Amino acid sequence: QVRLVESGGGSVQAGGTLTLSCGASKDIHTRLWTVAWFRQAPAKEREGIAALRSDSTTAYADSVKGRFIISKDNAENTLYLQMNNLKPEDTAMYYCAAGYMVASALESYEYKYWGQGTQVTVSS
């Protein structure tokens, strides 16, 4: 069982920066684990936006590529999402997720463990 807890959400103006954190209750940096960030806006489907595999390769959705950076502190079992140049369309609930032997890194069905979410609101 893996417990994930997100923090760092809030309100920011367009063009601003926020960094989300996700603390994990157990080691998730060992081989075959993938960690990821998803988001869900009202009336929209949950969207995979960034993933980090155990071999340190990453995957990003086109909507955030070049603006968001996913990273991990293995010693602290903490996942981060640095969000730069935020836009109003980035407004959503953001979730971290962890999965074992994930094939499609940005697909929600691949992930068994989820955090409770943290709200990000970007105003124009």
Image (spheres, helix red, strand yellow):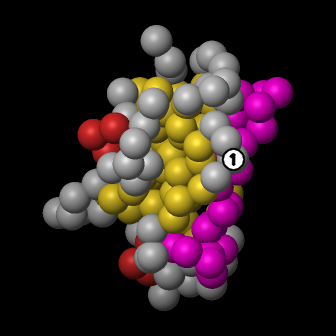
Residue 51 coordinates in the image, percent (x, y):
53, 51
Residue 5 coordinates in the image, percent (x, y):
54, 31
Residue that carries the numbered disc 1 in the rendered image:
56
Q: Does 79 appear in magenta?
A: yes
* Segment tinted magenta in the rendering: 64-85
Can see residue 93?
no
SS label for mark 1: loop
Residue that appears at 17% across and 63% down: 43
- Packing grade of label 1 (10 A; few <14, some 14-19, many >=20) is few
Question: Looking at the rendering, which quadrant does residue 26 occupy?
Answer: top right
Question: Looking at the rendering, which quadrant does residue 66 occupy?
Answer: bottom right
Residue 72 coordinates in the image, percent (x, y):
72, 42
Residue 49 coordinates in the image, percent (x, y):
45, 61
In the depicted structure, whether residue 9 falls above or below residue 68 = above
Residue furthest top in the image: 1
Residue furthest bottom in the image: 124
In the depicted structure, whether residue 58 falls above or below residue 6 = below
Question: Looking at the rendering, which quadrant does residue 103 occupy?
Answer: top left
Can see residue 17?
yes
Q: Amino acid at mark 1?
A: Ser
**Count of marks overlaid on the render:** 1
Residue that appears at 50% across and 18% down: 2
Between 41 and 25, the residue placed more toward the observer is 25
Residue furthest left in the image: 43
Residue that appears at 41% across and 27% down: 113
Between 120 and 63, the residue placed more toward the observer is 63
Q: Does 20 appear in magenta?
A: no
